[in-house]
Amino acid sequence: MSTRRSARRAVLAGVALSTVVALPACGGDHSTDGGHGRPAAGVAPVASGSAAADRADVMFAQLMIPHHRQAVRMSELAGSRAADPEVTGLAERIRAAQAPEIATLSGWLTAWGRPVPSDGRAGGHPPVPDHGMPGMMSDAELARLEGATGRDFDRRFLTMMIAHHEGAITMARQELADGRHAGARAMAQQIVTTQQGEIDTMRKILGRR
């Protein structure tokens, strides 16, 4: 009996030790502050299996998709309307950078179980209202850009794209302040860096006119 009691105590001691060792690891899995010093209370994951994303990340993706789509649309016009080769080249760089980001943002929303805004040309979820996106051009402004050619197009494009980029930077900085998803935050930082550089370039081109 004494031998059995000793063996039982050894087993229980081992279980207790295993539990103590495991507790810190389990506690780490339930942290929701994303490493940014925000309290966990009130932060809910957007979908099962997507605890690294929250409402701010979803909003960033849902707003940036139509914002990027408009920039791509504006940039595509430059190929047949711009007079300045530097404007044409800049527009192509904008299109080449933002089109893949649209695909990435759409993939995240799908993975998070959230609707991807439609582009208005096919079925699907309606676009997000423009009033939630700083820097978005109105339909009338886009129509004037589409109707312009040559130097007039260049001036309109540069002026409008500067405002558009400034709006995107505002949205990206909001994501950096509130978002938790590592990929979304990295994209937001890239938007701030890249588009601020493009704004500087566009202002220099305008300054030469």
Image: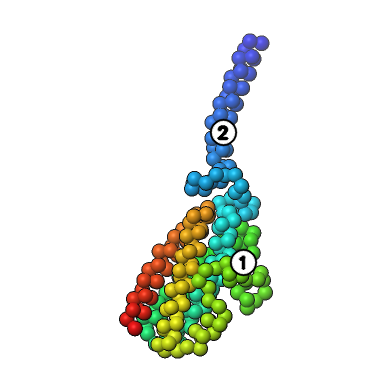
Left or right of 205 on screen, residue 72? right
Comparing labels 1 and 2, the label whose residue is closer to the camera = 1
Question: What is the x, y in percent for residue 195?
Answer: 42, 68
Query: Which quarter of the figure is the N terminus placed in?
Result: top right
Q: Residues within 10 Å of mark 1 (few under 14, many from 20)?
A: many
Residue displayed at 45% across by 89% down: 149
Question: What is the x, y in percent for residue 56?
Answer: 56, 57
The amino acid type of the residue labelled 1 equals Val
Residue 23: which numbered mark, if any? Answer: 2
Question: What is the x, y in percent for residue 181?
Answer: 53, 54
Residue displayed at 42% across by 89% down: 150
Residue 136: which numbered mark, if any? Answer: none
Left or right of 97 on screen, residue 121? right
Along the line of sight, the residue nearer the viewer: 130 or 53: 130
Q: Is residue 63 above or below residue 24?
A: below
List the single residue furthest toward the top: 2
For marks 1 and 2 on the same chain, the one whose residue lies earlier in the sequence: 2
State whether residue 69 appears in this view.
yes
Q: Disc 1 to disc 2, how far (Cα)?
A: 39 Å
Residue displayed at 44% across by 60% down: 189
Q: Residues within 10 Å of mark 2 (few under 14, many from 20)?
A: few
Q: Which residue is mark 1?
A: 116
SS at circle 1 = loop
Question: What is the x, y in percent for residue 155?
Answer: 41, 83
